[in-house]
Image (spheres, helix red, strand yellow):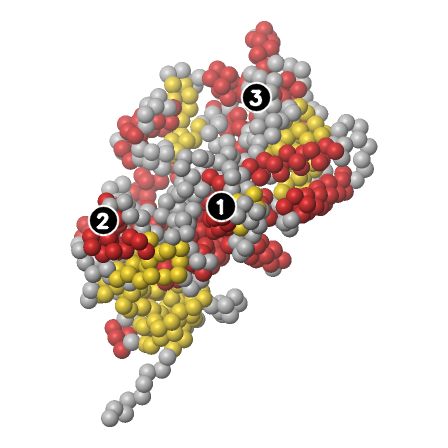
Amino acid sequence: MSTDNPPTEINVKGQVLTRHAIYRHGQLVLQYYIKTAQGPVLAELYHSEVICFCRLQDVNQLIQKAGFVLKAESISLLSFAHEPISALYLKSNSQLKLLSRIANDIGISLFEADIRPEQRFLIERFIALDIECTGYYQASKSVLPMPLLSINRARKVPHNQLTTIPLKMISLDFECSFAGELYSVGLYGANYQCVFMVGEPQANCHQFITWVKDEVTLIQRLIAWFREYDPDIIIGWAVVTFDLALLYKRCLLHNIPLVIGRGNTELNWKVADKYRPETLSLPGRVVLDGIDWLKAAFYQFDSFSLESVSRQLLAEGKAIDHVENRGQEITHLFEQDKNALAFYNITDCRLVWDIFEKTQLLDFALERAKLTGLEFGRVGASIAAFYHLYLPHLHRGGFVAPAYPASNGLESPGGYVMPSIPGYYKDVLVLDFKSLYPSIIRTFLIDPKGLVEGMHANNINRDSDTVAGYLGAQFSRQSPILPALVASLAEQRELAKSDKNAPLSQAIKIIMNSLYGVLGSRGCVFHDAKLASSITMRGHQIMKLTKKWIEECGYQVIYGDTDSTFVWLGDNHGIKDIQAVGKHLSVSITERWLKWCAQEYQLDSYLELEFETHFEQFIMPTLRGSDEGSKKRYVGAVSNDQQQLTLTFKGMEQVRSDWSPIARRIQYHLYELFFKGEDVIDYLSNELAAIKDGARDNELIFKKRLRRNVEDYTAKSSPHVKAAKQLAKILGDVNVTRKGQQIRYVMTLTGAQAIEAKPQNIDYEYYISKQIKPIAEPILQLCGHSFDALVNNQLLLL
């Protein structure tokens, strides 16, 4: 009889860093690298299966055609057509791909076949980022630099029951030659900085430099560093598409296994030659790219270069003199001053670190992962986030997701944009509906499952208790999923605001606002025009009725856009407390919606109108060459506490990066002068004269990024494309014609020319007629003048 004690079950709580499905001895194993308060743990689930679904009536035909043992089980779920469903269990993704081809060939639909097994395990248990695993430590743990846990059970960690997990983050940046040969790598973290530099040790060099003899040694030393420092998170600027992709290519060149993942695993790519964040595989480590995450958090910059963003956010730039020619300067520093190159390298790392700190990007990424269940570090993927949130509730509600969208070509209209009344106004109030589309979903019970149940009930009994939507939609009142999810998110956002948790509040806002976009996307299997239209067309009704009710109060609505209503109080209104009027209007209209929803639909209204802004002065321009009011374009002015004028531009050239700096500056000052009652004619005349005299040449430079490779442009005459071709010839570098490159150029008498060509024949008349005239005319019209008359008067004075 054995005297060994049975193994003790272990509970492990932590955060899922990365998730994987691997095959070991012919068995599917799900892997979760978890960071706990005590350190990293690799948790594995053995004897896993790939799961999808089909109609019960299709099972026998699939089994006959499969060519391999296909395990099927009848379950208590229905399709959206109310047909019985069977679950299919497969041994591998390759079997799933084969079965999908067979099913497609014989016209059988598979449901939820695109949900990866490592995702499904978490989805079905409502697990997002925080996890508690119960299981046993494996004897083979001594082989790994971390414990190995065999999972028996897993569950979501209840809110606030997980202690703060310390995550070790590092900022990484490579410097290299034009050909991609590595010069150095910078590593910057909390109380840590290091640069591995190729070269011989130099006197009086920075203490953070570690010298290596060549590129191969640099790579080997970096691999060893990953093992020793063991970061959880890697951050950088284009860190995936440039730095890690470059490192991977150099390792291929030198035949070095790039073992920088946890558990002695290699960095790899899920799709060959596609070096994107979504294709990166780096077990146990999360990679966050600063550019992608700033965009995900809805930060906006004219340029997302590190130099530009750091200047705006940190008031500090790169440690190099000629940023625009940094490739040449980096090579020069490597050859002449490696100490300065190391300082430049580590400064780039620190700038990225400081940007993440300033914008709380790590906190935002964490909160987003907790809310959506997406892999920590994955940007975008709104549809995948929707599936993670929705599917476990859908299954418990008795349904599987549909195989295909159901709209059959019927599409929904966009947000309501009210015709504007152009002109110059004083005292305009802006009233916004708080999270309008999520509020519509919550109020009118808009839900994919609710639509299926409501339409089914209505087909059986015309007097069924449903809520009417648009395009014939009927929504069940019984346990809708999406309204409950919106309610939960709204409650969490209010708590985040009260706790002053800005990253969480922003993450929730973005997720809530993405719900309509997901339902309106043909890439989502839940897409149905009845769903999307019941949101947008309800929005149209809400905006129109709101306008009617406000005008019944004696005010004029001059414009409306999606969820915003612009209210003019009128000339000589005599109102002393305008703020009070705005608050009263928002409260009274909100209360009216409460009564309307109760009377018309017997529903609780979650529509809330908020008083957003009081513009003391406001201009709604006309369309160019027309008396008709423009849409999505206006300028408003308010005075701050110091009685200084603050201008808000919407849709104007001032906020568009594809206009020249001089056009944006002149436009801002024209409106500022107009609102202050000062002379715009004299200012504009002086600026036009300065342009013609060549005194404003540094403000005439256009900056435009290539959205595709130059050879892929169909309109070869696009100015920035022409300038990119010219630049490639000047530099002898075809890389400047690649997608993503920013091209700087001016318009000359011979067309667009790159700045690097040092053009002399600038076409000043182009800038005056194409850049200044369009932005000046709206103001001049309000002043009773015309741009052409102003230019002609100037000519007479010459």
Foreground residue among 159 and 288: 159
Foreground residue among 616 and 8: 8
Residue 492 visible in the picture: yes
Q: Amino acid at mark 3?
A: Leu
> Disc 3 to disc 2, how far (Cα)?
56 Å
- Callout in the foreground (1, 2): 1
Foreground residue among 424 and 738: 424
Q: Secondary structure at mark 1?
A: helix
Which residue sits furthest top? Answer: 796
Q: Is residue 758 above or below residue 94?
A: above
- Callout in the foreground (3, 1): 1
Q: Amino acid at mark 1?
A: Asn
Q: Residue at x 19, y 58 (%)?
A: 68
Give the image quarter of residue 59: bottom left
> Disc 3 to disc 1, how far (Cα)?
48 Å
Q: Secondary structure at mark 2?
A: helix
Residue marked by disc 2: 102
Q: First in sequence, mark 3 or 2: give its number.
A: 2
Give the image quarter of residue 28: bottom left
Other-residue count near label 1 (Cα within 10 Å), few / some / many at <14 / 14–19 / ≥20: few
- Callout in the foreground (3, 2): 2
Residue 580 location in percent, x, y? 76, 42
Other-residue count near label 2 (Cα within 10 Å), few / some / many at <14 / 14–19 / ≥20: some
Residue 249 location in percent, x, y? 23, 49
Q: Are marks 3 and 2 in contact (CB under 8 Å)?
A: no
Residue marked by disc 1: 459
Residue marked by disc 3: 623
